[in-house]
Structure formats: C-alpha cells, structure tokens
Amino acid sequence: MQRIHIIGGKNHGKTTLFTELVEELSANGHRVGTIKHTHHQHELDLPGKDSFRHRQAGAVVSGILSRSMNAMFWPVDPSSTAEQETRYDTFAPMFSDCDLVLVEGDTQTSAAKIEVWRQTLGTPPLAEADPSIIAVVTHDTPGDLEASIWPRADVAEIARRVLALAQISRAD
C-alpha cells in the first residue's frame, strides 16, 4: 500500500488540501484511498446500535453492510506492542485497488510526510523539528528548512509532486 501522509497543526488547512488533492488525483484517473488518523480515543461505532452490541457481546470483529456503505469495527488492544506502522498493514487488502493512499495525520509515521503550514497561526512548522518531513505546503515563507517548500496556490502542481514522490506515473 503506497501511503503519503498529509500532516500539520490544527487549523493549518490539512483537510482542505487533502480533499483538494483527492479531487485532483481522482479527476486525473488515479484511484485514491484515504485514511484519517487521529490521536483521540473515541468510539467509532454508535453505542446502542446492533454492531456495537455485537462487539460488546464478544465479537472480535463486527461488520456492517448496507446498500450504500460498508464498515468494519475491531478493537485495538491498548496493551499491544504492535507498532502503528503494522496497523496500516491491516488496511492494505482493502486498498489493493488504489494507486495511492493518502493519510490525513500521523506525525509519527515512517512513511512520506508532507506538512501543511500557515504562518498566521503563529506556530513554527513541524519540519523545523522533524527532518523526516519531505515538504511543507504553504502560502508563506517559513525560513530555513531542510524540507522542500511547495506553493499552496497550485493544487495540480502539488498533486504532480505527490505522484512523483510516490513514484507513480500520470494516469492516461
């Protein structure tokens, strides 16, 4: 599963750029999968619903199939020593038809990371402290960084660079 992570601080524009990239890449014939990573611990299933009750009864995995959407829920053992990276492997079969998987979030990944940054919010780019960030997408000039600076204004160019980073040729 070819993954690229779009990261950044709160309100820096991650979700906006993320959805624009998905639209751009999809419009150009690429099959794009997405994952939202969160560090918050919250219930994804709805308490009281049948699937939730199935898990509460002891089901190891619970799935929902409907006419318009499918989902699976399985708990993560908090005492597990499984690395976050191996948890992405669990998703790999579901994304096997995708050219690229974009992940929103997860600053701790070893996969390629692109930061979205806005100077007006007053926080320094994460790339200042994290040399593993490949590029910073911004309207601003962030000063001395080892990461490449990608202009935020041109989503098509950012998409081209994401494809190059993932070593994916343009779809015809």
Image: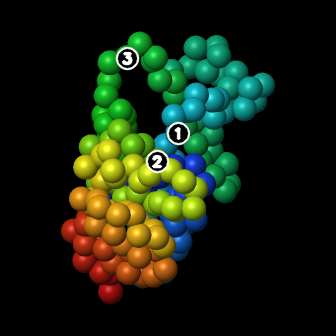
How far apart marks 1 and 2 lie (CA) works out to 7 Å
Q: Is 48 drawn above or below residue 34 in the view shown?
A: above
Q: Nearer the viewer, mark 2 or mark 3?
A: 2
Mark positioned earlier in the residue sequence (2 or 3):
3
Q: Read off the residue under disc 3.
A: 80
Q: Nearer the viewer, mark 1 or mark 3?
A: 1
Residue 29 visible? The answer is no
Secondary structure at numbered mark 2: loop
Q: Read off the residue under disc 1.
A: 38
Residue 42, position as x, y percentages in the image = 63, 29
Secondary structure at numbered mark 1: loop
> Residue at point 35% right, 33% down?
84
Q: Quadrant of the C terminus?
A: bottom left
Q: Is 81 drawn above or below residue 19 in the view shown?
A: above
The reply to whether the C-beta atoms of the residues labelled 1 and 2 are less than 8 Å apart is yes
Residue 37 visible? The answer is yes
Mark positioned earlier in the residue sequence (1 or 2):
1
Q: Which mark is residue 105?
A: 2
Q: Amino acid at mark 3?
A: Ser
> Residue at point 32% right, 45% down?
129
Secondary structure at numbered mark 3: loop
